[in-house]
Each structure stands twice: as C-alpha cells, then as structure tokens.
Image: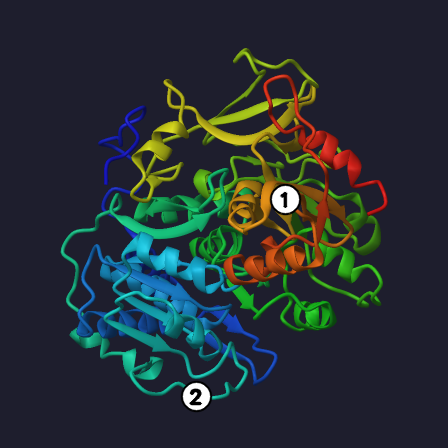
C-alpha cells in the first residue's frame, strides 16, 4: 500500500521494533494480575480479564484464525456491538498480521455488502442478531463466525448451519507461531468513515498508528495505572477503541466496558467500579441531567469536544476538550490537563502535530476568524496511512505540502485556544456520527419520480442534528414519499435516514446553479 507522496514514511520513528502485539505482551508482563477489561453486559455477572488473561485470549483467537487459514495481510470483517469478543478478535488480528475491518452495526444490507466487497474480506465475525444481514449479502466469505450471545443477551435463534461458533474459533495459543520481526508500518485495521463522497471511505491504520493512538491519548489524558475508564461508545469507532481502550492499555490502567450508554446504569457502574474518567458527548450529558446525582464518585475528568462548565458546577467534574478524527489517529487538539480553558474550547494544538487555519484563498486566518483547518503529521504514524484502494481520494485529502484537509471550520482565540465552528464539507453530525449529505442524496436521487434532492441538518436537542431531505419531484405524492422512505430504510443506516421529507417546487440556487443549502436551512424554521 503506497503512502501519500507528500510525506513518505520515515526510516526512523518511535515504534521501530514494536507492534500492537508487543504492547499487549509487554503490559501482560509488567501488569499481569492487574485488571485490564471489566465487562458489564447488563444481563450477567461482571467478568474481568487481567492483562495476562487478556493477552492469552488474543493469542488463542489468533491461533484459531490461523488454523482457519487466515494469513497476514488478509482482511477480516468484525461486525459486533460492544463485547469482550470484539477486543479479543481485534487484537488477535493485529497479532496475526491480518487486517481487521470494523463496521458499524447499524449498517444496512447494502452498506455491509459494500464494506465486504471493498475490503475483500475473507472471513467475518458477528453476533446472532446480525446473521440475517450476512445471509442476505452476496459475498464469498470463506467462513462466518458468530458469538454465543448478543453482547450478553441470549439470542433467538442460536447460530447454526455453516456458521462457526466463536467458541470453536478459539484455538490453542501454543500452536501460534511467533512472528519473527515486528512490522509497525504494516496495515493493521480499516474503519469506514463518511466523507463528502457518496460512499464511506476505508481509513487504513498501520500497527504504528494504533500504537500512536495508545501513547498519545494516554498522554493527552495523563492516564496512570490507577485510572479506570467507563467505555460506553461503540468500539467500531476510533473514540472508544483508540481514545479509551488503547490509551488504557498503554497506561496499564483498567476499563469498564458496557454494551452501550445507559443513563439508568451510568452512575451505579461508575461508582461501583471507581471510574476516574469517561469520554462523553452532548447526548449522555443531556440524558444524565434529569437524574438524581450520586452521593459521591471518583471522576476526575470527562472528555468532550469542548470544555463544558455544567459538568464542573453540577458534579464537580473537570472537563477537557479534544478534537480529532479517524484520519488524525489521535486528538490533534486538546485541553492541557490542569489548565482551565474557556467554555466550549476544543483546547490547544498538541505538540505532536502542526495545524493551519486558512481562508478560502489559502491565506492564514487571523485571530477570531473562522477558517478551514488543515493538519500536518506523518502518514502511517500520526496520520492515517491511506484510503483503502483509493489513491485518488488519498491524494485529494492532502495539499502539495502534505497538509491534510480536515474539512472542518475552526477559529483561534488570541490566547491560542481553538474553537469548532462547523463543517466546511457537506457533513452532518447525527448523535456523534458523521454523515455525508451526498450519501443520502445519492440514495434518494435513484428513486423514480425524484428530480432533485438536497439534504441538510436540522438542529435536534438530543442528536445535535438530524437529516432533512428537500425534494423536487415530477409529481409529489404520498406514494413517492413512501417509496423514498422505503428506499432509505433498505439502503441507509437508521441514523442516516431523513427525519423529514419536504417537497418544494424548486431548489434555491446561486449564480452558478449551486444549491444554496443555507436557504434550505432557513426553511427549517418554517412550518412543514
């Protein structure tokens, strides 16, 4: 896989001789009896894996993958909600040198088929509730393995037929051949992330990228071995997997993993396990506001997209801002621990990165002026390696001097704090998920009777914003609206589907015929 030409991979870097399995084994050696993973399934008693036990599970599943014919460099699709097996298999693939493809479990049949085909996955691991999706897609997997439960919930029906029970995939760790040389710059994982294209792009991380995320995020949060995270965001996202689980491993700390965020259970689990930090977002914060507060807790910090004063005043918890994306691997902007920042600030530029805020003409924006954020680092280390099988998209993401275009708009205060202003790209933020308007528009435009379609975000008190589709139709009707809804349900994950469909006579356009989405957003304040 060639790296972007602007910044070739360096001969010297921090992770020479190291890979992900080195980190697992080193922490097992240093902290063998310390808990790494604490699993709270909501359905069964708490389970705990020490660093030594966790390392053993990764070796066992790596041996099982190898016994089933998976080789280094081949792609394995991992499609599960939060559960210990996700982590066992993710690290097992890393140990084997296979490339793990993590996919959003809200994906539709069409989306899952695309992920499998795009990556060329040779095998898949999933949960009973998602087996019908795999049965419906046309992809030649060598085999599909399935967990015994749905993140702790007993499934109905149990997997059968040609499906491999995950317990049978667990091999004998002794049979796993040792990898002679660590390959830190070898591809390690793929995460599909929405951009402005009509299909998500596969973001390729190397083994060194994973180590970079682990080390840098542990530093951002100043994690120590006594820290304990509660992890409720989905592991198929960078936030939970890298910012939380990998940073925890680097610090020799502990993490309490839950299937999902539960406002009703949050304080009980946090207090019972003595959690000291959490990655948060507006949704869980709003969900906790109407609930009773605990008498005491051990939280020292919550991490948000920006400093949030209400957490300090309500619960006495300091907040820290951060900004990053799958392509930047770790947070490239973050608050400095112990130094209070202004309300809403993402933080300051991290020393591991360079950043530039630019006007439309490419010149540097002044203090307080909103501009487009560009970030520079090293592809394969501090930046993603490439977009999977898409050299044109990879090249387009960087300018001639190796600056990565984040597609986001920011501003900098005179004191150096950075603030998020919006998305320069045509993107929506739906409950923490990045959604490309073009992806939704492409699906709707294919419905017979649709002449034009434009999608914009409507503010939402719980999800930040939700998609609304404006349609110019040959003949607006209830049948056409029903057809649009049916098509979106079959082609798009639930969070991408428009919450409203509005028929209009003509799209507002500028001098060059470009649809003026700001005018459509203004229409959202009107009665439907």
- For discs 1 and 2, the disc positioned in front in the rendered view: 1
- Left or right: 359, with 217 as reference point: right
How many badges with numbers are in the image?
Answer: 2
According to the picture, the residue beneath numbered tag 2 turns out to be 158
Q: According to the image, label 1 marks what residue?
A: 474
Residue 50 seen in the figure: no
x, y percent for residue 371: 61, 21
Q: Residue at x 19, y 76 (%)?
A: 174
Give coordinates of residue 361: x percent, y percent. Answer: 54, 11
Q: Which residue shows up at 27% across the image and 32% down it?
A: 9
Q: CA distance from mark 1 to mark 2?
A: 47 Å
* Residue at figure coordinates x 73%, y 44% from the top left: 458
Q: As displayed, is residue 528 above or below residue 5?
A: below
* Residue 37 against residue 518 in the figure, above or below: below
Residue drawn at x 66%, y 56% is 481
In this view, the residue in front, 172 or 375, is: 375
């Amino acid at each position: 896989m060639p790296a972007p030409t602007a910044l070739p991979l360096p001969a010297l870097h921090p992770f020479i001789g190291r890979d992900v399995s080195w980190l697992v084994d080193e922490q097992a050696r240093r902290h063998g009896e310390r808990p790494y993973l604490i699993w709270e399934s909501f359905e069964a008693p708490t389970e705990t894996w020490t660093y030594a036990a966790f390392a053993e599970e990764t070796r066992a599943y790596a041996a099982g993958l190898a016994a089933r014919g998976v080789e280094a460099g081949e792609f394995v699709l991992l499609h599960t909600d939060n559960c210990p097996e996700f982590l066992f298999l993710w690290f097992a693939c890393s140990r084997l040198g296979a490339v793990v493809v993590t996919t959003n479990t809200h994906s539709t049949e069409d989306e899952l088929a695309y992920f499998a085909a795009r990556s060329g996955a040779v095998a898949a691991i999933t949960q009973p509730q998602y087996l019908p999706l795999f049965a419906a897609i046309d992809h030649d997997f060598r085999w599909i393995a399935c967990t015994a439960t749905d993140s702790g919930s007993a499934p109905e029906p149990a997997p059968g037929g040609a499906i491999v029970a995950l317990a049978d995939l667990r091999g004998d760790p002794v049979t796993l051949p040792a990898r002679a040389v660590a390959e830190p710059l070898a591809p390690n994982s793929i995460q599909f992330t929405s951009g402005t294209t009509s299909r998500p792009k596969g973001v390729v991380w190397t083994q060194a990228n994973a180590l970079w995320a682990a080390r840098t995020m542990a530093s951002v949060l100043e994690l120590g071995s006594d820290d304990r995270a509660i992890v409720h965001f989905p592991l198929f996202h960078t936030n939970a997997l890298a910012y939380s689980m990998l940073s925890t491993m680097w610090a020799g700390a502990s993490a309490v993993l839950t299937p999902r965020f539960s406002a009703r259970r949050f304080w009980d689990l946090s207090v019972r396990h003595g959690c000291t930090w959490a990655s948060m977002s507006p949704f869980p914060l709003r969900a906790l506001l109407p609930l009773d507060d605990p008498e005491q807790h051990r939280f020292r910090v919550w991490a948000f997209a920006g400093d949030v004063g209400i957490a300090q005043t309500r619960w006495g918890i300091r907040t820290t801002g951060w900004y990053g994306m799958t392509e930047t691997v770790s947070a490239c902007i973050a608050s400095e621990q112990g130094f209070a920042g202004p309300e809403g600030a993402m933080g300051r530029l991290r020393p591991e990165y360079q950043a530039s805020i630019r006007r439309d003409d490419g010149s540097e924006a002044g203090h307080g002026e909103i501009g487009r954020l560009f970030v520079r680092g090293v592809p394969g280390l501090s930046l993603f390696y490439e977009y999977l099988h898409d050299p044109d998209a990879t090249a387009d993401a960087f300018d001639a001097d190796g600056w990565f275009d984040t597609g986001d708009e920011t501003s900098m205060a005179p004191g150096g704090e950075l603030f998020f202003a919006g998305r320069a790209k045509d993107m929506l933020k739906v409950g923490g998920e990045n959604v490309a308007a073009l992806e939704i528009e492409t699906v709707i435009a294919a419905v017979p009777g649709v002449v034009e379609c434009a999608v914009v975000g409507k503010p939402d008190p719980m999800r930040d914003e939700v998609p609304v589709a404006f349609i110019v139709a040959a003949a607006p009707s209830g049948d056409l609206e029903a057809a649009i809804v049916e098509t979106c349900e079959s082609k798009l994950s639930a969070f991408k589907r428009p919450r409203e469909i509005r028929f209009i006579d003509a799209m507002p356009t500028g001098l060059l015929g470009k649809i003026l989405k700001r005018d459509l957003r203004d229409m959202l304040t009107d009665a439907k």
